[in-house]
Image (tube, helix red, strand yellow):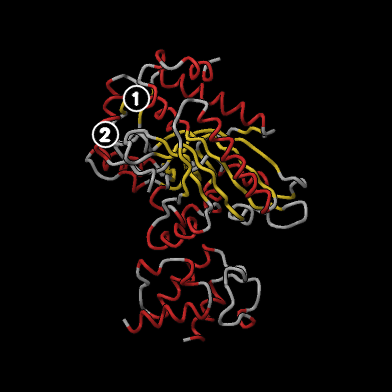
Amino acid sequence: MDDVIRKVLAEYAHLPVDVATISDDDDLYQAGMTSHASVNVMLALEDEFDLEFPEAMLRKSTFESVAAIRTALGALASS
Amino acid sequence: MTNSLRAPAGRLFRNELVAAGLLVPAGTDGIYGRSSVYEDIVVGIESVVMAAAASEGTVSYRFPPVMPRQVFERTGYLGSFPDLIGAVSTFTGTDKDHKNLMEVAQSGGDWTALLHDAGVALCPAVCHPLYPTLTGRLPEEGSRYDVSGWCYRHEPSLDPARMQAFRQHDLVYVGDAARAVAQRDRWLELGNDVLSSLGLVLETVVANDAFFGRVGRILSNNQREEALKFEIVTTVADAEHPTAIASANCHRDHFGKPFGILTADGEVAHSCCFGFGLDRITLALLRTHGLQPADWPVAVRNRLWP
């Protein structure tokens, strides 16, 4: 799962640094991801994992780190 | 949403305005002619706003209500508000195509499907045409502008505070990130001073734009969490649901980045704007002081028409 998350971030987060240098808990917004970019990350994750983030998850914090994204995807997969 | 009015109250107020001859329905929801009495109020508000802008040392520009399609695309409006856009189309065909166009139109068909891009879009926000003119380096302290004109947003409604075509007067700052936030906050105070001097009872609230769809929910939530947008609200049609008549917005680098606007240090510039909703302020004055401006409080009249 983490490989796919990082692949999506590399393609859509438009970070000024290499995604490989970002740790699981690093704040992606502080690393340079804009809210518009986070929207594209969300859409790409939905395509990759064939799921839809529910209304309650449509907030900044859901996509703030690799770990947060993993937790959100885990919660959706088990629901 | 603080600025969404419930239809019944909006419709009632609209009927009062139409009966008083202030607004003339043009035949589709949200498009109106304005009477000279109404326009005198707009002119008065503009003069008060212009005086405030002059005190801020702004450079004034007026743009037409259409902008090049390429500029429109770079503002990101298509991504955030696809349901509000107005793109202009025109006929580019031959005599034969024209005959077909007329046949489709005369049979009640959708003749607009036979048109092609005219290369321009209607301005959805009065400050948007300004940014492409600012490409390059700014002075150390940034730059201040004021722009005024017509905007179009496709949201037909019977609520007179939600017109499809309306006027905004914006104060715009471009410069470094810290100054942009400080300027936004200072203009929020200035805007409150200007509007309360017209006898309006105001409240300032954190707000969000009506971004489209699920994607828009993230943008709206972010905007509120980061307090990027404030609205000055007052009663227009519905006392239960105040209407935004002005807003103070921090854009971060949303315009600086696509239009290559740089600070004196070479960083991507941030921007902010303070928008006076000229039609909504007019409606708020009519609601607050009554439909006969001749009977308004002397202090308000003197301020609008010194």
What chain does badge 1 belong to?
A: B
Taking the image as shown, residue B12 lies to the left or right of residue A70, namely: left
SS label for mark 1: strand
Q: Residue furthest left?
A: B107
Name the one closer to the observer, B51 or B70: B51
Q: Is residue B300 above or below residue B276?
A: above
Of the two numbered discs 1 and 2 on the same chain, state the one appearing first in sequence: 2
Q: Label 2 belongs to which residue?
A: B11
Q: What element carries label 2?
A: helix
Discs 1, 2 touching: Cβ within 8 Å:
no
Q: Is residue B269 depicted above or below B124 in this figure?
A: below
Looking at the rendered structure, the kind of residue marked 2 is Arg
Q: Position of residue B216 (x, y in %)?
A: 42, 59
x and y percentages locating residue B165 in the rendered image = 41, 35
Could you tell me which residue is drawn at 41 percent across and 60 percent down? Answer: B217
Q: Check residue B69 in the rendering and tell me which mark sits there, or answer none.
A: none
Q: Residue at x 32, y 42 (%)?
A: B101
Q: In this view, does B269 lie above or below A50?
A: above
Rendered image quadrant of residue B8: top left
How many numbered tags mark residues here?
2
Taking depth in this image into account, of B295 and B169 the one nearest to the observer is: B295
Within 10 angstroms of label 1, few (less than 14), some, or many (20 or more) residues?
Answer: many
Residue B125 percent location from the top left of the image: 50, 42
Mark number, residue B23: 1
| Image quarter (top left, top right, bottom left or bottom right) of the C terminus of chain B | top right
Mark 1: which amino acid? Leu
